[in-house]
Amino acid sequence: MGNTSWKINLPTTANASGDCSQNNTEVLELKWGNANMIKISFDKTNTSKFEVQNMSFALNLTFPGKNASIYNYNHSKCEFTAPLENSYKCDRVQTLNFTGVTDPTSMAYLHISHVQLQAFHNTTGTHFNSAIDCEGSSSADVVPIVVGCVLAGLVLMVLVGYLVGRRHCQARGYLSM
């Protein structure tokens, strides 16, 4: 069976619910349409950080020539770590590998971008705390630093060349006027 790609955007009308009753685990569920759901489980890693411990989704899809089916996939790798007093934010595309719940050989890939998450938020406000940006989003900061170092090295080489040339000329008996 060949690979099939589907782009499914999470609608802004998705219903959000969750469970914050446990001390070290919080759950966020987003539901939309007929039996479509994404579930995100957050864990406290210690007293100062949180991370996404598990993600799962169920999609009610109809493929050409087949009846509608609900596809269930799971991702159990720790992702999106941030300090408890901050949110996690990432604008770049990240790819997560999911395996089928009923068929572990079945794979799905979730490409997410422009995501901001915060767990264990102890206020009733609707705004995120200051964000910790994901690795790689700020890679553009490296380019000016590298260019600056290269230019500083070139200036140093020109200065050394000038001083060597000047000393060489003075050793031959030439004097500047």
Image (cartoon, rainbow, N blue to C red):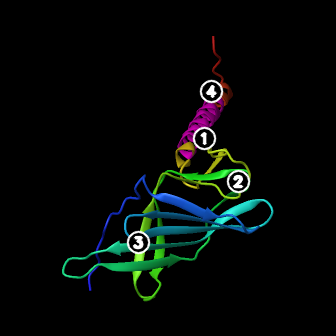
Between marks 2 and 4 in the image, the one whose residue lies nearer the viewer = 2
Q: Earlier in the sequence, mark 2 or mark 4?
A: 2
Horizontally, residue 108 falls left or right of residue 118, namely left
Residue 125 percent location from the top left of the image: 66, 44
Q: In front: 166, or 72?
A: 72
Q: Quadrant of the N terminus?
A: bottom left
Q: In front: 2, or 6?
A: 6
Q: Secondary structure at mark 1?
A: helix
Q: Which residue is mark 1?
A: 149
Q: Quadrant of the C terminus?
A: top right
Between marks 3 and 4 in the image, the one whose residue lies nearer the viewer = 3
Work out how far the residue at label 3 is from the one at label 4, CA to CA, in angstroms.
Answer: 85 Å
Labels 1 & 3 near each other (Cβ < 8 A) = no
Q: Which residue is mark 3?
A: 35
Q: Earlier in the sequence, mark 1 or mark 3?
A: 3
Q: Secondary structure at mark 2?
A: loop
Q: Amino acid at mark 1?
A: Cys
Work out how far the residue at label 2 is from the one at label 1, CA to CA, in angstroms.
Answer: 42 Å
Q: Which residue is mark 2?
A: 121
Few, some or many residues within 10 Å of mark 1 (<14, 14–19, 20+):
few
Q: Amino acid at mark 3?
A: Ala
Work out how far the residue at label 1 is from the one at label 3, CA to CA, in angstroms.
Answer: 55 Å
Q: Amino acid at mark 4?
A: Cys
Which portion, as a residue range, is magenta? 142-165
Q: Earlier in the sequence, mark 1 or mark 4?
A: 1
Few, some or many residues within 10 Å of mark 4 (<14, 14–19, 20+):
few
